[in-house]
Image (spheres, helix red, strand yellow):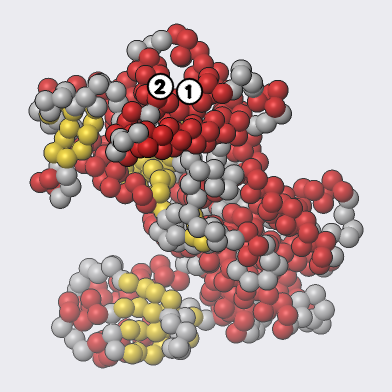
Amino acid sequence: MDINTIIKSEFSKYLSLKYEIDFHDFEIQQTRKDFEGDITVVIFPLTKLLKQNPVKLGNELGSFILNNTQQVTGFNVIQGFLNLTISSFYYLEFLKDCLNEDKYGFVKLNSDSPLYIVEYSSPNTNKPLHLGHIRNILLGFSISKILEASGKRIHKTQIINDRGIHICKSIVAWLKFGNNETPIENNEKGDFFVGKYYILFDKKYKEEINELVKKGFSKDEAEKKAPIFIEAKDLLMKWESGDKEVLGIWKLMNGWVYEGFYKTYEDLGVNFDSYYYESDTYLIGKDIIDHGLKKKIFYKKKDNSVWIDLSNEGLDEKLLLRSDGTSVYMTQDLGTAYKRFKNNPEMKGLIYTVGNEQDYHFKVLFKILKKLGFVWAENLFHLSYGMVDLPSGKMKSREGTVVDADELISDMISNASKLSNQLGKLKDITYKDKIALNKTIGLGALKYHILKVDPKKRILFDPKDSIDFNGNTGPFIQYTYARIQSLITKSNFKKTEFSNEVEINDKEKELLKLVTLFPETINTSADNLNPALIANYTYELVKNFNSYYQSIQIIKVEDKLVRTFRLCLSFKIGLIIKSSMQLLGIDVPNKM
């Protein structure tokens, strides 16, 4: 039983016997480093309930727990905070109980575990995945792992935006300038190949706009009358009307893109349980809009466009269907949400991993679904995250200034190789193992650098800063794990009982305190949809272990009982590092 549960139980019994009250809602925190103690009980709520002086009540509770348990060896009271010092006996017993748990801190799943759907990636099929997509993908995949560890069944999904004006732009550019070339002929990834034509469209579009402006048109008029843009709009209308020739080209080019996406996902080590396509779900969305019109939740304007007025909700009017009958993103998102619920009627939560530029969009989407009377709409969540910037500025897809995901992955692996060679860390391994290890280190650096930042914050991403064997980096944590595995191997360690008579020092106690916090960290990370809590917990654990490793002897200590305990502690910390990095989608090597 963890210490918080023990403390709450003992205090509840005491309050019931002495004051005849049924109180269980204790707030327990880690004691701040500038105060003596290990855990702190906030007793202000009790002082209001019992109408007692906080210091007097704190001393009363502290004296009771000190005299009636083995787990507490001291206490002090500061205003309404009761700071408790936890005994070495408790920490040693705790380590014994969890030593052999490979999945320590994880909640076991069963058929009754609640089902959560997590959406991430959700790219457009007109360009390759880029650095912004990587943050999205890594966040969504990690949150899937963390939610699963906290006791939820997880279904990983994405919506592929495979239709719309942006897709038509790539098609028009390929038809006009592509000479029927294919990615296979050019030896290019399909998504990169199609993305070139999206950039080319934008270039030609701007040229035509400038020509029209020179002829006296305003910029707004020129943007609408540019011939290449009119071609793209016409192509979209043909697509929506089911033109067979247009649909054939659309399927061909999307197929090229999907092959490229799958390769990138494989390289990143992520996967999905299902795929939804906008080309299917927008039709469901149109049916929902018809339903909303009949119920007078939506309304038509004179030009036949369909809207909803949410001004009474603190929002504004939102377009749901254009005047020409073509759909917008909201149309598709209404249909996708409905279809997901129909496919998974038992779902208890649906989490959208989408950048904070779409915060308003999701407020509107959730509000509309609730107005339509869908009860499950209460279980929709937006995992909003900040954009990724480069030292050179903001990325722009149309101008071709994005960092391609495949190029970034390759560069990270290359940087890992260069640094490892400089430090002489790959001397005694085979070429094949060296290649695999460089990939593990490079991807670990990339993933950790992104996931250690709170999702709500913007990231300034500099690949060079992320690969370092010191500091708060993925390679530093991976190297510490490898160091522990080397320690275990050299000592011929076998998991065994250790004595409760061992005296633990301050560094060992601090490490054991961190071990006890792992389950709580998983749950807090899941509740807040924030992998950074796992990342920074792991760094704190690793930093403390390295300080411990450098200041005391583990294998060479003469006392056999002490050596056994220290090896058990190191072994357990290794397991937690591995588990926590797996929650971030990061592999850890046994050797570095």
Q: Name which residue type carries label 2.
A: Glu
Vertical placement of residue 217 versus 565, above or below? above
**Side of 97 where 81 appears, left or right:** left
Q: Looking at the picture, which amino acid does disc 1 mark?
A: Val
Name the residue tied to disc 1.
172
**Residue in the picture at 20% in, 78% down:** 19
Counting from the top left corner in percent of width and height, residue 491 is at 82, 68
Q: Quadrant of residue 547?
A: bottom right
Q: Which residue is disc 2 drawn over? A: 231
Image x and y of residue 102, in percent: 62, 54
User: Which quadrant of the view contains residue 310?
Assistant: top left
Q: State the residue lying farthest toward the top.
A: 244
> Would you place residue 494 above or below residue 223 in this image?
below
Q: Residues within 10 Å of mark 1 (few under 14, many from 20)?
A: many
- For the point 40% across and 21% down, which residue is it? 231
Q: Is residue 29 above or below residue 199?
A: below
Q: Are marks 1 and 2 in contact (CB under 8 Å)?
A: yes
The picture places residue 362, in percent across and down from the top left corner, at 30, 43
Q: Nearer the viewer, residue 443 or 78?
A: 443
Residue at 16 percent of width and 23 percent of height: 304
Inspect this view and state whether residue 262 appears: no
Q: Residues within 10 Å of mark 2 (few under 14, many from 20)?
A: some
Q: Secondary structure at mark 2?
A: helix
Q: Residue 525: image x %, image y %?
A: 44, 58
Residue 509: quadrant of the picture: bottom right
For marks 1 and 2, the one nearer the N-term is 1
Cα separation between marks 1 and 2 = 7 Å
- Looking at the rendered structure, the secondary structure element under dot 1 is helix
Question: Which one is nearer the viewer's eye here, 454 or 361?
Answer: 361
Pick the front one: 80 or 154: 154
